[in-house]
Amino acid sequence: MGCAISGLAAKAEFGERNTGDDAAASAAAAYLREDQIQMIKESWKVIRDDIAKVGIIMFVRLFETHPECKDVFFLFRDVEDLERLRSSRELRAHGLRVMSFIEKSVARLDQLERLDALALELGKSHYYYNAPPKYYSYVGAEFICAVQPILKERWTAELEEAWKTMFQYVTGLMKQGYQEESNRQRHLAVSPKERPDKRSTAL
């Protein structure tokens, strides 16, 4: 569709990461420099004027390049005509929710603890949405493709690298949050028979 990092290229550009502890380590190693933070914040001032448009374009592109992602969305699972989605109120609402998360992330780029907490919590909530971590990187790639025409001559290789780095950092933490919640739920699912019975084994 004309965007260099769209589709399969997203896997290489954003890196398919493992979940768990190494995701946190990878995210920490890829954090933004101060000049990159400022570039992102300045570009966001332009992007936020079109956040509804960007949100819709981002998800229509996502479903075009990765149709398997539709399985996560009950309302869009059986939609074949992707052009119809451009006027979907439900897709607009979801796109705005995702854009709101991106806006909060941008606002917290120089408040690392708050950004970490935000991304970890979102990753945990995605466990309950049955949205597996392999999809998270795709959204960042499609966001970048969607905003390039809006930023026009403001878009540079340096700005693209800054946004990629931000999404790598955030999605790494989301994957960690998803895995933590998955592990917690598996632990809770252990039946009493499988758990050590302290009363019966105590001497």
Image: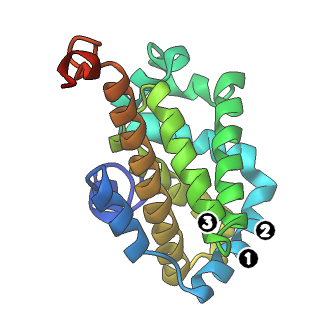
In the image, residue 178 above or below residue 17? above
Q: Amino acid at mark 1?
A: Glu
| Residue marked by disc 2 | 45
Q: CA distance from mark 3 to mark 2?
A: 23 Å
Q: Amino acid at mark 3?
A: Glu
In the image, residue 106 above or below residue 132? below
Q: Earlier in the sequence, mark 3 or mark 1?
A: 1
In the image, residue 4 above or below residue 196? below
Location of residue 165 in the rendering, given as x and y in whole percent from the top left corner: 46, 71
Q: Name, please, the residue furthest toward the bottom.
A: 35
What is the secondary structure assignment of the residue under circle 2? Answer: helix
Taking the spot 77% from the left edge, 58% from the top edge, the residue there is 48
Q: Amino acid at mark 2?
A: Lys
Q: Label 1 near label 2: C-beta < 8 Å?
A: yes
Location of residue 149 in the rendering, given as x and y in whole percent from the top left corner: 62, 62
Taking the spot 67% from the left edge, 69% from the top edge, the residue there is 151
Does residue 77 show up? yes
| Residue marked by disc 1 | 42
Choose between 39 and 199: the one closer to the eye: 199
Q: Nearer the viewer, mark 3 or mark 1?
A: 3
Residue 114 horizontal side relative to residue 188, left or right: right
